[in-house]
């Protein structure tokens, strides 16, 4: 997705060979026009998948899930990283390790918002080692629903996340695939071929 790649080129910061900082447009401050385009692209990619609901994880996946849900005409639900004292109903839960934050969270979704028989699109902002997506897929499986696919805004293709997800049989669609962050420079997969 060229609009996304251009935004990464212009505003993405590379503090190390493994980290891309995109907080000026994706996960702290949100660029609404870019987010609408991201939602449209996910809707286009998964238009024929029979999606009935979108699942993401708080907080960075919420904007992309919202715009994709709007374009697909389906609701979205997000897994919470911290259980609220108000969550006194039955939940699905699983542990998810964050590569960027180097911490593990027990994520939860109320069972009433993730019923059996749904066709779920998982959306996340980044794909590194695939832990968040695998955790969300585990929640979908617990619910007795089906993962139709996994939409990723930015994939770090130099890490093993996409491979792990595809080996488990998941369809993965990434809007920007990064081949390298070496020497402070973002190189996209198609540029490295």
Image (cartoon, helix red, strand yellow):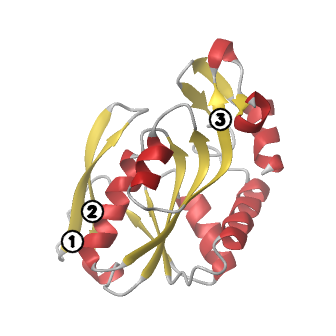
Dot 2 and dot 3 residues touching (CB under 8 Å): no
Specify few, some or many for label 1: CA neighbours under 10 Å numbering under 14, 14-19, or 20 or more: some
Between residue 115 and residue 22, name the one nearer to us: 115
Is 13 above or below relative to 41? above
Is 27 above or below relative to 191? below
Where is mark 1, residue-wise?
91
Q: Is residue 45 left or right of residue 94?
A: right
Dot 1 and dot 2 residues touching (CB under 8 Å): yes
Disc tally is 3
Between residue 126 and residue 84, name the one nearer to us: 126
Q: Which residue sits at x=66%, y=66%?
A: 42
Q: Which residue sits at x=81%, y=32%?
A: 10
Question: Which tag is nearer the camera, tag 2 or tag 3?
Answer: 3
Q: Is residue 39 visible?
A: yes
Q: Is residue 141 left or right of residue 4?
A: left
Q: Position of residue 58 (x, y in %)?
A: 43, 55
Q: Position of residue 162 (x, y in %)?
A: 50, 46
Q: Position of residue 96 (x, y in %)?
A: 30, 48
Disc with the residue nearer the chain's start (1 vs 2): 1
Q: Position of residue 16 (x, y in %)?
A: 56, 17
Q: Which mark is residue 126?
A: none
Task: Give the spatial CA distance, label 1 vs label 2.
Answer: 6 Å
Where is mark 2, residue-wise?
108
* Tag 1 secondary structure: strand
Q: Which residue sits at x=82%, y=39%?
A: 6
Q: Residue furthest top?
A: 183
* Tag 3 secondary structure: strand
* Tag 2 secondary structure: strand
Disc with the residue nearer the chain's start (1 vs 3): 1
Task: Give the spatial CA distance, label 1 vs label 3.
Answer: 35 Å
Q: Which residue sits at x=42%, y=39%?
A: 129
Where is mark 3, residue-wise?
178
């Amino acid at each position: 997705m060229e609009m996304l790649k251009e935004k990464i080129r212009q505003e993405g910061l590379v503090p190390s060979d493994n980290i891309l900082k995109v907080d000026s447009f994706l996960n702290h401050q949100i660029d609404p026009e870019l987010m609408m385009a991201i939602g449209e692209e996910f809707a286009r990619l998964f238009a024929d998948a029979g999606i009935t609901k979108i699942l993401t994880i708080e907080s960075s996946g919420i904007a992309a899930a919202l715009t994709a849900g709007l374009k697909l005409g389906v609701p979205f639900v997000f897994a919470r990283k911290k259980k609220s004292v108000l969550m006194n109903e039955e939940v699905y839960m699983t542990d998810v390790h964050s590569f960027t934050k180097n911490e593990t969270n027990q994520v939860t979704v109320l069972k009433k918002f993730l019923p059996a028989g749904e066709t779920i699109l998982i959306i996340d902002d980044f794909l590194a080692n695939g832990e968040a997506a695998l955790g969300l897929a585990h929640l979908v499986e617990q619910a007795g629903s089906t993962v139709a696919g996994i939409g990723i805004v930015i994939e770090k293709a130099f890490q093993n996340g996409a491979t792990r997800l595809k080996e488990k049989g998941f369809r993965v669609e990434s809007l920007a695939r990064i081949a390298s962050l070496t020497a402070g420079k973002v190189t996209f997969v198609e540029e490295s071929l």
